Each structure stands twice: as C-alpha cells, then as structure tokens.
Amino acid sequence: MVKRLLWWLSLILLVVLGLSYRHYLAFQEDAFAKWAMDSQLTQTPQGPVEFQRKGAGIPLLQFHGTPSSYRGNLNFPIYQSLFDQGFELISPSRPGYMRTPLSTGRTPAAQADAFSALVSQLGYDKVVVVGISGGGPSALAFAERHPDQCRALVLIEALALPIDANAQDLSSYARLLTLVLDHNFLAWLVASPLFSHFLPEGPQQQMSEEFAEYLAMFPHFEAGMRNDAEQFKRLAPLPPQLTPCPTLILHGLDDQVVPFDNATAMLAQIPGAKLVPFKGAGHELFYSHAAQISQAVADFVKTPRAP
C-alpha cells in the first residue's frame, strides 16, 4: 500500500515537474522575445551593441553589473527618479550579455571603446558615465580612454581592484551565480515565487515579474558572466591620475561582494573625486538607498563647474 502510494506521488511529481519545465521554456522564450523587442541592435566598428534609451535630458551611459543586461535596473526606482529630474538613460548590454556578442569586446578597454562608438553614433557629445558593480572596470576605462566624451563619472558599488578568488564572500556570490546558471530551471522555479512573496501589491509587483524574467535570462548572460570572471582576476592596478572626469563614488561600508577598499582605492587615484559612504549598506545599495543615490547623482551632475 505504501509503495503504491509512493509510486503515485512520484508519478504526480514527475508530471508536475514536466509541466513546469514546459512552462519555464515557454516563459524563457517569451521573455527573451520581449527583451529583444524592447531594445535596439546597432553595428559599431567594434561589433554589434544592443541598447535601449529611456527618458529625456542629460544623458547617462550605464555600464551594468554582473550578471545583467541593457534592462538591468531600467525600471527600478533610482532611474525613475532621475527621469523625473531631467535625465536620459542610454543602457547597452555589455559584450556577452543578451544580444551584444562577446566578440564586440572582452576586456574593459574594448568594452569602453565599443560604448564610445555607440555614443558617437547616437549623436551625443558628452555623457555621464555610470559604472555599477561589475561594470566599474569598463566605466573607468571609458573615462580614461575617452575623456572628451565624459561629462562626469559615477561609480556605484563599483569594482576597481582585481578579484581575490579566495575571498570568502565573493566566492560565495560567484558560486551562487554559477548555481543559478547551471540549474536555471530549478532556480527559476523556486526563487521566483519566493521573491514575489516578499513584495507588496502594487507597483513593486513589477519588480517580481522583472526578477522572474531576469532569472530565466541567465543562459543569455553566460558568455558575459564567464568572461567577466576571467577579466576581473587580472585587472591592471589603478594608474595614478586615473581620469580627469569629475567623479562621484557611492559605496556601502558593509559591501561584502565588492569591498569598500575598491572605493578608497579609486578615491586615492582620481583627482578631486568625491566619496559618499553609506553606513550599514551592503552590495544591494543600488536598491536599498535608491532615493539617496538618485538625489546624490542629480546634485553632483548638475553642480556648475569651471570649464
């Protein structure tokens, strides 16, 4: 009797998993089509670059983190606030993510050159460069290599120093990303409803939908994730007098993924840089302190400076 019951329960479980997997594949296909439809693909001298623009006003060029894409943070509160304050976001997918192929640029310097070409093709004179987390090295390279296009540089929980593969917290973060990538169906099946459960009804529910799509997109992030992991191990030391761009550094004091040492290292090497530390904040700073960050960025960029 017990064996028969277990047999039926196993069969039901297999059927449920099978149906869930079919739903996952359909969801993943629909999400990719939706994300591709929302973006544009342009050819630069370095190769194809996927991007989206949103808002109107002072142009911000985003170098997204690891893993992410042009869509990263696009619909979250920090940028919504900046749109309301007269900013436009140019948000490309870094090489290896979504529809920007890795061949467009493996190194931070190559990615900076590709985005510089994109800025020129879109007709912008100068942009505010925003480097978030793993997008930090490429944002720094842009400011160093293309200062004539850089109105200001904003670094949010940005990586600048070579990764120590033995760092416990970072290794745990890397293992988690690898787990989500290698077992994407199970991660999507379990994590999506859990994330949704902790969000209130209303506008925040959009974040839940975005998160489910984000998890399903991990296979389309794989090339970029693996390349970033290799590039971050061999980042060159920060040169003295790193960039002439006015620079704002925003970093959580308790960041365990990209330690605060990265912020102090950039402060020491960038003349006139301004550092705003956030007490009690970790690597989720972009979300946990969205209002403070958006206001700090707006105030910094709009502050008049001598030519």
Image: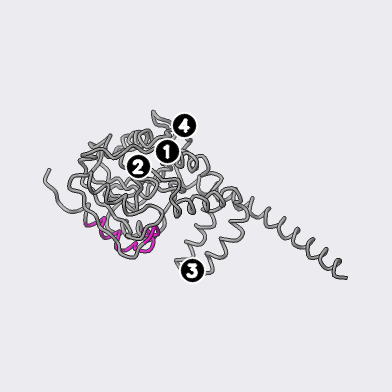
Q: Nearer the viewer, residue 116 or 285?
A: 285
- Of the residues under marks 3 and 1, which one precedes in the sequence? 3
Q: Is residue 17 magenta?
A: no
Q: Give the distance between the C-alpha atoms of the residues marked 3 and 4, in whole angstroms.
A: 38 Å
User: Based on the displayed image, in which of its 4 quarters is residue 197 positioned?
Assistant: bottom right
Q: Give the distance between the C-alpha atoms of the residues marked 1 and 2, in whole angstroms.
A: 9 Å
- Badge 3 vs badge 2, beta-carbon distance below 8 Å: no
Query: Which amino acid, by three-letter code, is at mark 4?
Result: Ser
User: Based on the displayed image, in which of its 4 quarters is residue 234 positioned?
Assistant: top left
- Of the residues under marks 1 and 2, which one precedes in the sequence? 2
Q: Give the distance between the C-alpha atoms of the residues marked 3 and 2, in whole angstroms.
A: 33 Å
Stretch of the chain drawn in magenta: 282-299
Element type at marker 2? helix
Please name the residue that numbered disc 4 is placed on: 103
How far across and down, in percent of the image, does residue 156 sit?
Answer: 33, 53
In what quadrant of the picture does the N terminus appear?
A: bottom right
Residue, far top: 45
Please name the residue that numbered disc 2 is placed on: 137
The prevailing secondary structure element of the residues shown in magenta is helix
Query: Which amino acid, by three-letter code, is at mark 3?
Result: Leu
> In percent of the image, x 56 and y 45: which residue is there?
219
Q: Is residue 290 magenta?
A: yes
Please name the residue that numbered disc 1 is placed on: 231
The disc label shown at residue 60, or none: none
Mark 1 or 2: in front is 1
- Of the residues under marks 1 and 4, which one precedes in the sequence? 4
Please name the residue that numbered disc 3 is placed on: 199
Element type at marker 1? helix
| Left or right: residue 112 compared with residue 19 | left
Neighbor class of circle 2 (other Cα within 10 Å; few <14, some 14-19, many 20+) is many
